Image (cartoon, grey):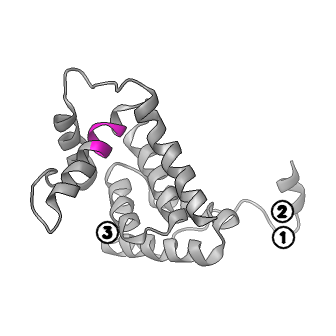
C-alpha cells in the first residue's frame, strides 16, 4: 500500500515534466532557473558541488527547481503548500522541515501551512499528522512564531454535523 502511494505520488508530480514541453521563463535555462528558484525558497546557493553527495544534489536541484518548477502556472506559495502536504503524507520529515521553512519564506502564512498539514489527518491518520505538525511547529519556533497559533474552527459541537453535510 505504502509503495503504491509513493509510486502514485511520483507519477503525479513527475508526469507534467514528462508530458509537457518544459516552459522556460524568458530565455532562462534550467540551471539559471534552478538557481533563481532555490535562492527564492531557501536563500543561499544551489549547485554548490559541496557536501557528501554533490552529484546527487546537483541532479536533484536541476531537475526539481530547474525543470519541474518550469511546468505549469503555480506560484511558489502554492507549490510549497503542495510540497509540504506531500512530504507530510510520505513522512519525509527532514525534507518537510526544509520546505516548511521555504513555504514561510515565499509568503505562506503559519495558519495556511498548519491547516494544509491538518487536512492530511483523515487520509493518513493522526499519528502521521502529529509527526508532521511537530516538524512544522519546530520551524515555527525557529522563526519566532508564537505557539499555539490562533484557532481557526468555524463550527460548534451543536452544528458541526449539519454544516459538514452541506
Residue at which label 3 appears = 143
- Residue occupying image coordinates x 64% and y 75%: 126
Q: Relative to 64, is 112 on the left or the right?
A: right
Q: Position of residue 73 (x, y in %)?
A: 43, 30
**Residues at marks 2 and 3, CA–CA distance in whole angstroms:** 34 Å
| Main SS class of the magenta portion in the image | helix
Residue at which label 2 appears = 160
Q: Secondary structure at mark 3?
A: loop
Q: Where does the magenta region start and end?
A: 63-68
Q: Secondary structure at mark 1?
A: loop
- Residue occupying image coordinates x 15% and y 55%: 44
Q: Position of residue 76 (x, y in %)?
A: 37, 42
- Residue occupying image coordinates x 23% and y 21%: 26
Residue at which label 1 appears = 157
The crowd level at tag 2 (other Cα within 10 Å; few <14, some 14-19, many 20+) is few
| Position above or below: 149 against 116 | below
Q: Residue furthest top?
A: 26
Q: Position of residue 22 (x, y in %)?
A: 34, 27
The crowd level at tag 3 (other Cα within 10 Å; few <14, some 14-19, many 20+) is few
Q: Earlier in the sequence, mark 3 or mark 1?
A: 3
Q: Residue furthest left?
A: 49
Q: Nearer the viewer, residue 126 or 16?
A: 16
Q: Position of residue 31 (x, y in %)?
A: 17, 37
- Residue occupying image coordinates x 16% and y 51%: 46
* Disc 2 to disc 1: CB gap under 8 Å: yes
Amino acid at each position: 500500500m505504502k509503495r503504491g502511494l509513493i509510486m502514485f505520488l511520483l507519477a503525479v508530480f513527475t508526469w507534467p515534466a514528462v508530458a509537457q514541453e518544459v516552459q522556460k521563463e524568458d530565455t532562462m535555462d534550467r540551471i539559471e532557473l534552478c538557481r533563481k528558484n532555490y535562492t527564492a525558497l531557501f536563500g543561499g546557493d544551489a549547485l554548490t558541488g559541496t557536501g557528501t553527495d554533490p552529484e546527487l544534489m546537483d541532479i536533484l536541484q536541476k531537475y526539481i527547481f530547474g525543470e519541474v518548477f518550469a511546468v505549469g502556472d503555480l506560484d511558489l506559495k502554492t507549490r510549497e503548500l503542495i510540497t509540504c502536504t506531500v512530504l507530510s503524507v510520505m513522512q519525509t520529515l527532514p525534507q518537510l522541515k526544509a520546505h516548511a521553512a521555504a513555504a514561510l519564506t515565499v509568503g505562506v502564512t503559519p495558519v495556511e501551512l498548519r491547516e494544509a498539514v491538518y487536512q492530511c489527518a483523515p487520509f493518513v491518520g493522526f499519528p502521521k499528522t502529529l509527526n508532521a505538525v511537530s516538524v512544522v511547529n519546530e520551524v515555527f519556533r525557529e522563526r519566532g512564531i508564537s505557539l499555539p497559533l490562533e484557532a481557526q474552527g468555524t463550527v460548534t459541537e451543536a452544528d458541526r454535523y449539519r454544516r459538514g453535510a452541506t
